[in-house]
Image (cartoon, rainbow, N blue to C red):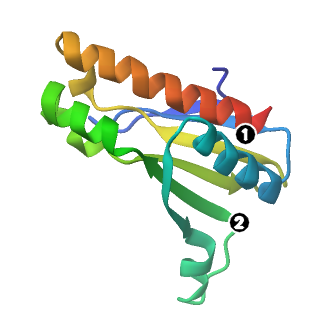
Amino acid sequence: MATIGTTSQGESPASTWKASRHGFEATLERLRLAIGAEGLWLIHEIDTQGLVAREGHAIPPLRQLLFFHPRFLIRLLEECPGALTDAPLRVIVRETPGGGVEVGHPGLSPALGEGQGCATMGGTLRGIYGRVVETACC
């Protein structure tokens, strides 16, 4: 997946961002559809812009979508319990100061690169992130 930037602070996994060819609401809708197409559950959608506004602050549109499926949680518990903090998966949609839209997601924990089961699970989750973001942005 092509990225427009990654960040990493300390021991935190890098975040990956991709520019969307669509407006904010269209990108959100495409994300929702892409998550469903992967057979995943949209667990929660956080309107970060709305929450910040409740405290009297104005920010550009910003939403977080949390998604997963119990089948992956069971696999994490059985194959890689050290990576439970990777569940649920999360993507962020933000409007940039220039009016563009970006979709980002956090990197996966280092635990998903250790051992056969964890590495396989890490590859599965990375693939989901890649397909969901690509579908939403392109």
Distance between the alpha carbons at the discs numbered 1 and 2: 16 Å
Q: Nearer the viewer, mark 1 or mark 2?
A: 1
> Which residue does the numbered mark 2 point to in the structure image?
61
Q: Residues within 10 Å of mark 1 (few under 14, many from 20)?
A: many
Q: Identify which residue is drawn at 62% across, 35% down.
A: 132
Q: Identify which residue is drawn at 36% across, 33% down.
A: 13
For marks 1 and 2 on the same chain, the one whose residue lies earlier in the sequence: 2
| Amino acid on which disc 1 is placed | Ala
Horizontal side, residue 95 vs residue 90: left or right: right
| Amino acid on which disc 2 is placed | Pro
Q: Toward the viewer: 65 or 104?
A: 65
Could you say which disc has been placed on residue 136 in the image?
A: 1
Residue 18, image x and y in percent? 68, 34
Q: Identify which residue is drawn at 84% across, 55% down.
A: 99
Q: Identify which residue is drawn at 56% across, 35% down.
A: 38
Horizontal side, residue 138 vs residue 7: left or right: right
The quarter of the picture where residue 11 lies is top left
Q: Quadrant of the C terminus?
A: top right
The quarter of the picture where residue 48 lies is bottom right
Determine the secondary structure under disc 2: loop
Q: Residues within 10 Å of mark 2 (few under 14, many from 20)?
A: some
